[in-house]
Image: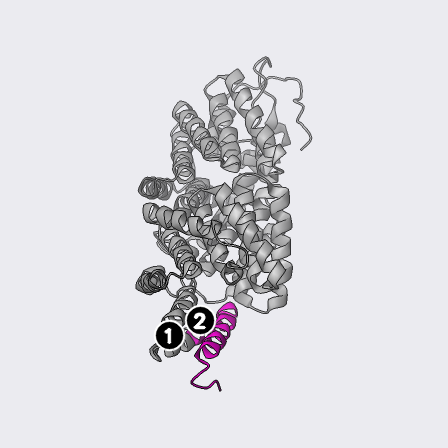
Amino acid sequence: MSGPDEAGVRTSAVILCARVERFLGNYPEAAALLRREMNSRPAPSDRVAIGLELSSSAPHNAMYPAMRSEVARTLADARTLGDEPGEAGALAVAAFGEAYEGRVTVANEYARQAAGLMDGLTDGDLAALCEPLGRLGWAEAFLGRYADAERHADRGLRIARTTGQVYVLPLLLLCKAHVRIQVCRLRSARDLADEAEDIARGIGSSELLAFVLANKAQVRIAGSVPGDSEALRAAEEAVTLMGPRTNWRAAMAWCMLGYAALTGGDAHRAREALLRAGGEDLSGLQPSMRPLFSELLVTASLFVGDLASASRWAGRAHEEAERLGLPVQRASAMRSAAQLALHDGDPTRAASLLTEAAAVCGRAGATFWEARSLLLAAQATAATGKGARASALWDQGHRLAAAGDAGLLVGLAELTRPPSPHAVGTVSWSADLTPREREIAALVAEGLTNQAIASRLYLSHRTVETHVSRVFRKAGVATRTALAALMARPVQPAAEPTYPNP
């Protein structure tokens, strides 16, 4: 209803309407509004604002490569006008999009330029840029620049709360929670995820709530004991809310369902969920996440006795990590290779890979993954007979995990604590097994796959998987080869070890 002299008012109204549609998950409606307005030949300053909102649909609805030219045009218009907030917003969108696509060098440059501009603007200048601040923070998190990511998320949160932009708070809160997972500060990550959930449930967007719940599941997995039921419930609700959608947020929901299922011992369901998320080659996942989820597929495949798939996923993790050149992803690929080395009976190589992975993560400030790598390295090192070295690695990993309230890793530490180098013999862990578990453990040690065991014992494949998972937990091992090696050792009574209270 605006007149010819009120073009700016009309543009603001169109952008606001489109933003509401986008946050409700109605992407086609939002894009149609914006493209119609762009076709009406708006003023250059309005074209920048429309372009920023239009490009914000990537990668949730349109893949970023399809929006790259739109972002470039918006950036060029902003620079021509000397519009620094508009330029900063376009650079932030570009950084996020390129980071999502795995173009690390380009994304880093865009992020550097965006941060340089945003850090020089006042909070008033950035009042309309809370969402781009969040996108910049996520881009920096993907790129392993954790301190910068949290700094920009914090600034966005402060401005959004001051100006009443409640709808953008979940994006910023989850960015900060994601960073807190990486640096192993799980208690605060849980608080951030809970706040994001409270806000998302009031907004009314099923897709936004699903994205929040997927991230909450990730926080719960990392911060709780293995197999935490709340993590699985959050992931299941996220998948249900997503329905048939196939965008980035839907992929994240399915990935977290797979992650939660695997930590709960259901390797079969984990593989199904992860492949549902990214496809048979994980091409549907964001590149920076592919090595990490390939690692989970290696674990799940070894668990069910599918060595060929495990080898394929380990190779894929290595290829993706080398292409990205990011430290956390490289460390993930090393852990995948270490799993295969343990399976092949080469704990020395596994220990070397895992120790290097821990060092790489430590230098990058990724404390959660450093602690995980250390604990796995302790287990592999113990298998080489270097008890004192294994204990030192375990102590360091456990200390980092406990300090960060990483319940998953504390639980892993309890399962994998190496025996004291001064202890004589081995504690009879098999005494804790049920007769059926002892029978299945013996068949695993003989080299039988889960399917072969199921056929021999007239059990379902899923039942065998459950029993094998329980045996692994009671034995404190993560691979079939490690279990076989443990069962081959002579058992002698020893003093019961004392475990630290988590």
Q: CA distance from mark 2 to mark 1?
A: 24 Å
**Rendered residue at 48%/49% (across/down):** 119
State yes or no: residue 25 in magenta: yes
Q: Residues within 10 Å of mark 1 (few under 14, many from 20)?
A: few
Q: Which is in the foreground here, disc 2 or disc 1?
A: 1
Viewer-nearest residue: 452 or 109? 109
Q: In the displayed structure, would residue 339 be above or below residue 255?
A: above
Which residues are drawn in magenta?
1-30
Q: What amino acid does circle 1 point to? A: Ala
Q: Which residue is mark 2?
A: 27
Q: Main secondary structure of the magenta part?
A: helix
Indicate how the structure is coloured in the image.
Answer: one colour
Name the element at disc 2: helix
Q: Is residue 266 visible?
A: no
Q: Which residue is mark 1?
A: 43
Q: What amino acid does circle 2 point to? A: Tyr
